Image (cartoon, rainbow, N blue to C red):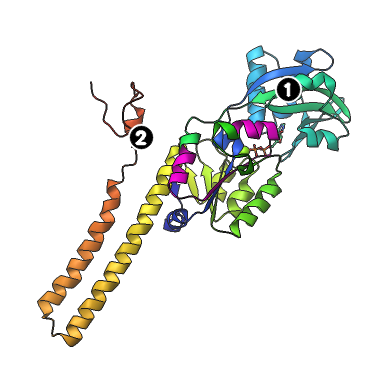
Amino acid sequence: MLFKGGGALEVLAGIDTFAFDKTGTLTTGRAAVTRIVALDGDEAGFLALLAGLEAGSEHHIAAAIAREVAARGIAAARVVDVTARPGLGILGRDDRGPLWAGNSYLAEEMGARIDQPELRALTDTAQTVIGLGRGPELLGAVCVADEARASSAPALSALRRGGVRRIVMMTGDRRPVALRIGADLGLKPDEIHAEMLPQDKVRAVGEMAANGKVAFVGDGVNDAAALARADIGIAMGAAGSEVALQAADVALLSEDMERLADAHRLARRASVVIRQNLAFAIGAMLMLVAGGLFFDLPLPLAVIGHEGGTVLVVLNGLRLLSDPIRRPKQRAVPQPAAAMPRNSVPTG
Ligand code: ADP
Ligand code: MG
């Protein structure tokens, strides 16, 4: 975890609500294309066009499509004037005219529909459905599926155990996808917010910030504004975008979500130690002053009291170094037995 200053560590200790982005944050972001329906039957031509358009996007969906066409050995079509519609999809133009690719909201805006009977096999799944169209004419659609990170569910339970009152997931994706991933993570339906545009995420963070401190954890793809709006923005540093690192106060430099729970626990311990030290130092000062003024405290004793107090404060602070945060080195060792306790040192 990279903290941009000690202030972020203190704020992290007092967080009431953790709001998570879904795609690329709670999920791996390494999505795969699972189904393809080209309405004219020409799957290769359809994928070439879709890949040409998505080549201009930094979204996880675009990367999934690029991997699919590369695996099939299809060359992407030439698409120009590409512009992103954050939270909706992408627009562009080829030599036959304007094109779009995106979700049902973007389709609706273009006068097309994704929920047609030919696409029932796609829309009935709990996967992300991306339509490709030319104005009001839908050319086809693909399903893209992504899975929760293995470390996400344990991280969420550790945060709850650590005293976080509320955890929510926010996504621009379809509700069935959000509910499936949320269920995998042990989230209740009222903790899952789907079909949100980037500005909806900012508004929701603002509303939650009215009842306590809010942390937003995101990868910066369509959520940099929410990262900046929250009391503390936590960026997925390794998996996230450049803009996320700029907007955030904390960056998670590993893909391991449990590091976030570790950092939260360390922040809470640090805040307890800070309070203990302040109380102790002020108490010791008052005693020494009272001793000096009213009880003829000998100077050597006063010096020992003053310097000794400083040493105790430092020693109390050093207790934080004993925090049993799992070291990356230790984690790199393959753990053969599932029953092995978390912090044990592998032998043999
Ligand atoms: P999340 O909140 O889950 O991270 P986003 O806000 O990034 O999701 O995107 C929301 C939805 O917008 C996606 O599920 C997808 O339907 C659509 N979308 C966004 N970018 C693209 C793109 N480049 N191509 C197609 N669809 C996109
Ligand atoms: Mg995202």
Q: Is residue 260 left or right of residue 121?
A: left
The C terminus, quarter of image: top left
The location of residue 230, given as percent across then percent down, is 58, 54
Q: CA distance from mark 2 to mark 1?
A: 38 Å
Whether the residue carrying mark 1 lies under 8 Å from ligand 1 is answered with: no
Q: Quadrant of ligand 2?
A: top right
Q: Amino acid at mark 1?
A: Val
The span shown in magenta is 155-181
The image quadrant that residue 28 belongs to is: top right
Foreground residue among 191 and 65: 191
Residue at point 64% right, 17% down?
70
Q: Amino acid at mark 2?
A: Pro
Q: Is residue 103 left or right of residue 308?
A: right
In the picture as drawn, the residue positioned furthest to the bottom comes out as 294
Q: Which residue is mark 2?
A: 328
Q: Which residue is mark 1?
A: 142
Residue 161 within the segment the image draws in magenta:
yes
The reply to whether residue 345 is in sight is: yes
Sequence order check: which comes first, mark 2 or mark 1? 1
Residue at point 27% right, 32% down?
344
Q: Is residue 257 above or below residue 131?
A: below
Residue 43 within the segment the image draws in magenta:
no
Residue at point 52% right, 31% down?
149
